Amino acid sequence: MDNAPRAKVFHRAALSVVLAAVASGCGQEAAISAGSANGGAPTAPAAPAGSASAAGSPAGPDASSSAGAEAPARAVAPMSATVAAPSGPIRVIDMHVDTPWQVGFKGRSLDLLEGQATMRQLEEGRYAAITYAIYISDKLHGGHPTISDADSILKTVEQIIAKHADRLWDPRIGGVAPADKVTAIISIEGAGAFAADITQIDRFIARGVRFVGPVHYSDNKLASSATGAHPGHGLTASGKAFCRRVYAAGGLVDVSHMSDESFADLVPIAAEYGAPIVATHSNARAVADVPRNLTDDQLRAIAKSGGITGLNLHGAFLRAGAASSMVDAVKQAKHMIAVAGVEHVGIGSDFDGATPPSDLADASRMPALGEALRKAGLSESDLRAVFEGNARRVLAWKPKVKDGPG
Ligand SMILES: [Zn+2]
């Protein structure tokens, strides 16, 4: 969800390469992990769950001491091995789409016959997986979103998956995704409500949430936002505990929408857990200078962690201050690849929550984007890495269960 631009510009590009995409040869999608990884539940004491009422204190960068629980300490191994990419036509794993918000709050029918990510568009776009965000608006209940909101939006996501069971595949049931279905991954965007009881995130991760973004457009009790009033605040004490808890439970913290200081605070926490840092839908600030995009140093930090940055197709994040097009998406992708490496760039379209350029108007345009990237010099293995292989790798990450003392 990013329909609220800010602006400035400049640019650069170049390109590197390499990634040996290993064909699995099975004719089906390699499993996209449904999460719930994790051995043993985190042991932090539960805070009172009265949090779900709308009357909580206002979210703000200074309100850092609320949450009730310490994060569980757990040693975790380095990132898990790369998951082999499947053979066959290149498909897309999209790490951020806002269709549930359209259904839950904008009156879109569950039939999904309109918008930027209809079933037909996903099919034409050759989607292997789509990430439906539980977007918890900062504005709910007069600025006091609650954990109950997250529950009700998750319900909407589950209704979408159930309604389109013939096209969507729910990875939570286990097994291998049929080749003709689109795996439905779930994420959270804007988790400030969880400051009231950070232990509650465990059950969302257990129910399939893979990416968890602590903050959205405004600062909250977990983190300062890239677009917040006090972006320099960083992760609060509860925010740090929350991020540890996400990793311990097998989820991945999403740095998209974090301020630079929140990002910096997350880096050592991800390292503690050997977790790849993920920005599900962010571009390069060097190409489009807006706070929602990442600096080159941040792109490199993500790469160093084994993580990924998903190319966001929101027009104002592709090119700041002027109309954008496919050309700008290619410029962004090439810059991100040049800086971070081709193994650390993916796709996070922001469809149904963004205003993409007219030549990237909806999910059906992904093969056209692929073609443009080929023309710009990406090899087939580069393209497969960016479109699906890299996301597959980070989704396969699991915290290592530590057995025995020491
Ligand atoms: Zn967003």
Image: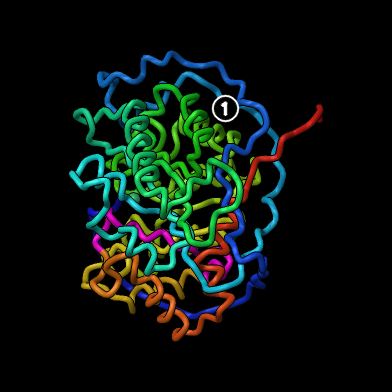
Q: Nearer the viewer, residue 37 or 140?
A: 37
Residue 263 location in percent, x, y?
A: 47, 47
Residue 282 location in percent, x, y?
A: 40, 58
Give the structural element (helix, strand or loop) at label 1. loop
Q: Residue at x 32, y 76 (%)?
A: 326
Q: Is residue 22 left or right of residue 128?
A: right
* Residue 233 visible in the picture: no
Q: Is residue 181 left or right of residue 142?
A: right
* Residue 81 visible in the picture: yes
Within the magenta stretch, is there residue 348?
Answer: yes
Quarter the C terminus occupies: top right
The residue at which mark 1 appears reads as 71
Residue 57 versus residue 402 in the image, above or below: above
Q: Residue at x 43, y 44 (%)?
A: 187
Residue 393 versus residue 11 in the image, above or below: above
What range of the chain is rendered magenta? 339-355
Residue 123 location in percent, x, y?
A: 39, 65
Q: Nearer the viewer, residue 302 or 310?
A: 310
Residue 117 location in percent, x, y?
A: 31, 58
Q: Quadrant of residue 381?
A: bottom right
Q: Is residue 7 left or right of residue 406?
A: left
Q: Nearer the viewer, residue 394 or 179?
A: 179
Residue neighbourhood size for the residue with mark 1, other residues' Cα within 10 Å, grouped as few (<14), some (14–19), many (≥20): many
Q: Quadrant of residue 289?
A: bottom left
Q: Quadrant of residue 250?
A: top right
Disc 1 residue: CB within 8 Å of ligand 1: no
